[in-house]
Image (tube, rainbow, N blue to C red):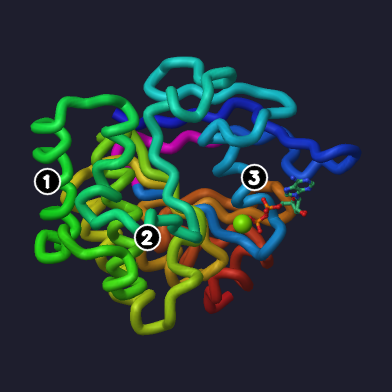
Amino acid sequence: MGRIVLDQVSKRFGDVEVIPPLDLTIEDGEFAVFVGPSGCGKSTLLRMIAGLENLTSGGIAIDGMDMTDVPPSKRGLAMVFQSYALYPHMTVRKNIGFPLRMEKMDQAEIDKRVETAARSLNLMDYLDRKPGQLSGGQRQRVAIGRAIVRDPSAFLFDEPLSNLDAALRVGMRLEISEMHERMQTTMIYVTHDQVEAMTMADKIVVLQAGVIEQVGSPLDLYHKPQNVFVAGFIGSPK
Ligand code: ADP
Ligand code: MG
């Protein structure tokens, strides 16, 4: 599960239409990347899918259910933010289990889910540490773990690696790709980095000034860019 359909979705801030009406479908299990220059509307689009931003027009459906007016916590999505706010006084175990404790889930079930998440993220050896005793990459994984325990139908990432140094970024990129391979859950990943887009995506959505310039696989975009903007942005030979 995790098919996301945007139907004539648009966004206006005051007098400025930052996203004219657009249609887009993300298939179940797909790794979709929204890529484009800073200010083109990637975060706004993602936040509308998450329910953190109202739509000016149009509708959003997830697995055939109209989600347009459904609050963020009821959409079954997990948003992984750029700045991962972990609770410094809590262990990794407590941090990952936090959303489930808020839902008053049974402790035995919480323990089971936390261990499953920790195993899939290679955090088993760190469960009793506190965030201050972890590297940046490990902290990022704890933040992802906190999303995984809720068993979302899709993960939404907004430039999750942009605070990390270059070496760590490559490692985390691979980890997120491997996580997608293992879980086969829909992921939407926002970045301004063409290399991330080309190496991680099943489907790339190229945006410029709120307009979708092209949707396609990395190979499609590389070999058949639809216009000069896409060719230039992707670094195609044409
Ligand atoms: P990106 O994530 O691609 O860098 P954003 O989605 O953050 O782009 O922003 C798209 C455009 O919308 C930008 O011009 C930005 O200044 C504008 N914008 C974003 N959020 C707001 C807001 N809350 N109020 C007014 N303008 C906004
Ligand atoms: Mg952004």
Q: Residue 159 at what x, y percent from top left?
A: 50, 61
Please identify, in this view, whether the residue under mark 3 or under mark 1 is nearer the observer: 1
Q: In this figure, which residue is indicated by the disc labeled 1? A: 116
Question: For the residue labelled by badge 1, is the local secondary structure a helix, a strand or a loop?
Answer: helix
Point out residue 238 in the picture as x, y percentages from the top left corner: 58, 75
Q: Is residue 148 above or below residue 102?
A: below
The alpha-carbon separation of the residues under discs 3 and 2 comes to 29 Å
| Residue assigned mark 2 | 88
Residue of label 3 = 44
Taking depth in this image into account, of 21 and 185 the one nearest to the observer is 185
Q: Position of residue 234 (x, y in %)?
A: 54, 70
Q: Are marks 2 and 1 in contact (CB under 8 Å)?
A: no
| Amino acid on which the number 1 mark rests in the picture | Thr
User: As displayed, is residue 27 above or below residue 34?
Assistant: above
Residue 212 circle label:
none
Circle 2 packing at 10 Å, graded few (<14), some (14-19), many (20+), is: few
The residue drawn where x is 71% and y is 33% is 10
| Mark 1 Cβ inside 8 Å of ligand 2 | no
Q: Amino acid at mark 3?
A: Thr
Q: Is residue 148 left or right of residue 21?
A: left
Residue 2, above or below 43: above
State the extent of the magenta-drawn residues as a range: 24-30
